Amino acid sequence: MKILTTVKKVVDVELNMHVKDGAIVEDGLQYVINAWDENAVETSVRLKENNGAETTLVSIGGGDCTDMIRRCYAMGIENGIHIDDPALTKADSSIYAKVLQKVYEKGDYDLIITGKQSQDTDSGQTGIILAEYLGLPCVSNVIDLEVTDDQHIKVSRSGDAGTEIIELALPAVIAVDVSINEPRLPQMRGIMMAKRKKIKTMDLAALGTSSDEIGAAAPKSEIAEFMASESRKSGQKFEGDAAEITAQVVALLANEAKVI
Amino acid sequence: MNPLLMSLLIVVGLTLFGRTMYHKILLLMALEPTDRANHIKERIKNLVIIAFGQKRLVGRQKERASGLMHALIFWGFCVLLIRSLNIYGEGFVKGCHLPFLGDNFILGYFYIALKDIMEAIVLAAVCYAGYRRLLLKPERLHNTWEAYLVLGMIGILMISDLLYDGARYNLIMLHNNPEQLHFFNNPQYGCEFLWTPFSVVAGTLISWMSADTINIIMVGMFWLHVITQLTFLNLLPLGKHFHVITALPNVFLKSLGYPHEKTELLDLEDESVWEDESLGINHIHQLNWKQGLDLYTCTECGRCKEVCPAYTTDKPLNLHDFNDKLKSELSDNADNIIKRAELSAGIKLDGDPEQIDKIKAEMMELNSEKQLIGDVIAEDTLWACTTCRACEEVCPVTIEHIPRIMAMRQGQTLMAGVYPQELNTALKGLERNGNPWGIGYDQRADWADGLDVKKMADDADVDYLLWVGCAGSFDDRAKKVSVSLIKILQKAGVNFAILGKEEKCTGDFARRAGNEMLYQMTAQENIETLNNYKVKKIIAACPHCLNTLKHEYPQMGGNYEVIHHTEFIEQLIKTGKITLNKSFQGSLTYHDPCYLGRYNSVYDQPRSILQSMSKDGLKELDRHGRESFCCGAGGGRMWMEETIGKRINLERAEEIVEQKASNVAVGCPFCLTMLEDGMKDLGKEEEIKTLDIAELVADNMA
């Protein structure tokens, strides 16, 4: 089984983000592997270890992706493709999906594993659009996966009413949730060995396509502006006995909140 | 007596002994190198105090009786060693003695008096030892037949020598035996017995026998003594009593300058170490020779496990068992280890890469069949250690347990990738945001908002850098300590700054969890930051940070004068920069943090501060100072689950509750969390307050 795993480098959401003039202040930000994609990598590596799959990852982004790709090597991924093209700076999910479609077509993959969303834009569309482009079956929000035979996998998808268990014929696309597994930390030995491993870096031309073909020249959606979310005001503390407190609260509800 | 028989016994006895020792030494030489041939003066001082002075045996109040017992046997042996030389001489020449111990020298009389008394004392000590083992049965002791055999042999050595002299006395005094039977040649035949009361008593016991019988006893006891002694010598290297021979060199060769051998700074860039899997300890042959000597020296006295927080709370770490298992693995693989070392020596001479690969493959074949972690030492055992050093502090023969455990953890983490997975969250937090909590690095100095604290980035022209640490920066409870500390420093008018978001975890917990790579990465970044600002003096608000900054960063080019905040506060008080009111009310006790006390010998300063503010004085816990009991958070355990046995912090909290202290002072954010959690578990958090010394000082400043 050949697996293609998609990985995106995103801003570390542990950091406080600041907005200035409708754009995020880049200074002081750091970038990390998207949490859901880390689970996708872990899923692929486990399939390699348990079912002998061959693992390849693809990442679209600037030159600083290589550290992340090497980190995934250290987790156990075997091959890495890095798509780096200035035309993709403002790409949206559908453009990413187009690029990934090209990558898929160049390889002979049986399964595409993506994270179900990324922690920067949270749009959760890339995997699904990719499946649409490829005409492949797709399940999102996958929380468990089992290989039934060479041609089929069985996945669990978490839904509002319970868990659905779905059997898929390969090739297929799945988008995994963070609850599917606990990603390993890269092995130290792997990190050192990964330093010597090659990363296949390609631009759109090398991929056999162009900015126009994938629609990068005119993205269908674009981020217009960032706005800082208002920080939560601190709560109000009431002191006194129960009757006094009740009176104060009622007064506030009536006069300030105007709900009673 | 009989030169021929004596020669035969000496030749056989010493040849066998030499052969055993040769193999034992050859094995040590085949282990990894470590340099201990330095600071000879200090080494001699240790030898005198710890070994000859038996400091850790007689110095511990809890073990005074058994300590004295051992010390007396040891001192007896030292005295009797000279006597033995005389005895062997007597095998060849009657009345033989060493220079100055006979003829007209008074020293000879003093010596035989001392020898006589020591023999009686040793005999009494052996009886006590037997009584202790058979009837008192202290829990730490591992009762084996070997122990009784050795006690028996020591007893025989004493009795045979006393009887030998007693018989001599009888023959000279009662039977007017004309032969030269003195202890030594002296002008007044037989007068030496005035100096040997116990030999005379022994003689009196057999005085009713005939001269012939007494003569037989004299000769018999002489040879019994010699044969027992040579047998004893040959038995020593085969069991735990090898320490009789190895303890002195082991103490002499102990680590200096830091309580134990510092964790080696591994060269992670060297590709061959990853290919050869030679980082840390994953195989028995990777021990260094001093660690091998430690194993030879372990006497299985069990003091280590008795004070071990892991063992006493039912974790699977039993240090004496740990040593025993390594010792067996070492001796099981002795021949292969020696062969391996020979092959390895060959590599350096031969430059042909193909040949080298061949030799390396051969060496690989000689690896032990057992997995060191897994087959010999269980994983849970390895990870149970909190690195608190209580074991090392009480070990009479200065065995260094922790460096070995740390190297094994390195082997597991770096080479095998096997370590407690619950560490991942903290490790990932450290990797990304420079703190085990994983909170954004940009929020590191949020606690200081509004406190008017300088940052190095704004003004690096300060006298001190305050190293806040991750806990003091991110943990809500510890942040209050940081605020108190700022209050004190500002009141004292200290010119200081913090690094703010440029500070990162020192890497302590990563290193102690064996993750040398993450440690080095984070240490490197910190050292670059510190050196950029030309930092000279650091006040550390956490003993773990203190220890790493002070003792481990110099390995990577970070040299600073580092001092713990309690040490600094004490200086401020002494120099009158701050004044404390004696206003603290309520019973107060102090919990020594391991990395402040045992690792950095800071015991007095925190106590002095507390005493100067407390109306009711300071009440010591049962386990305090050098023998303080760990809170359970050291050695990376802060970030691991504690699922086996009783929780260590609970054990300590219970001890504090039992002592009826209503306030417990600490000097470490980890201890603070652990003890406070322990109190919460016991429902005592309202009655017993856990406070950092900085908080107490801030509240009681004039």
Image (spheres, rainbow, N blue to C red):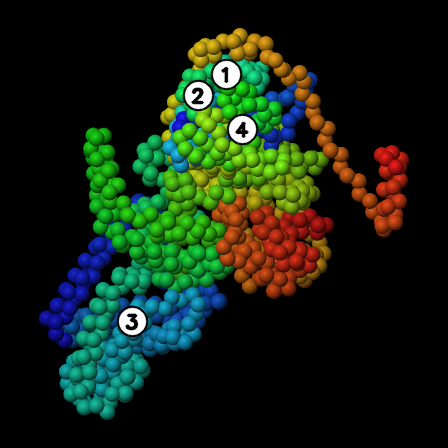
Depth order, front residue of B690/A168: A168
Are discs 2 and 4 less than 8 Å apart at CB?
no
- Which residue is at a point 16% across and 61% down the rendered structure image? B15
- Left or right for B180, reference A96: left
Are discs 3 and 1 less than 8 Å apart at CB?
no
Q: Which mark is residue B142?
A: none
Question: Which label's residue is closer to the chain start, 2 or 4?
Answer: 2
Residue ID for mark 1: A99
* Figure check: B532 above or below B128: above
Q: Residues within 10 Å of mark 4 (few under 14, many from 20)?
A: many
For marks 3 and 1, give the one nearer the viewer.
Answer: 1
Q: How much space separates mark 2 and mark 4, taking CA atoms?
A: 24 Å
Question: Which label's residue is closer to the chain start, 2 or 1?
Answer: 2
- Residue B446 can be seen, yes or no: yes
Q: Identify the image quadrant of the N terminus of chain B.
A: bottom left
> Which chain does tag 4 point to?
A
For marks 2 and 3, give the one nearer the viewer.
Answer: 2
Residue ID for mark 3: B149
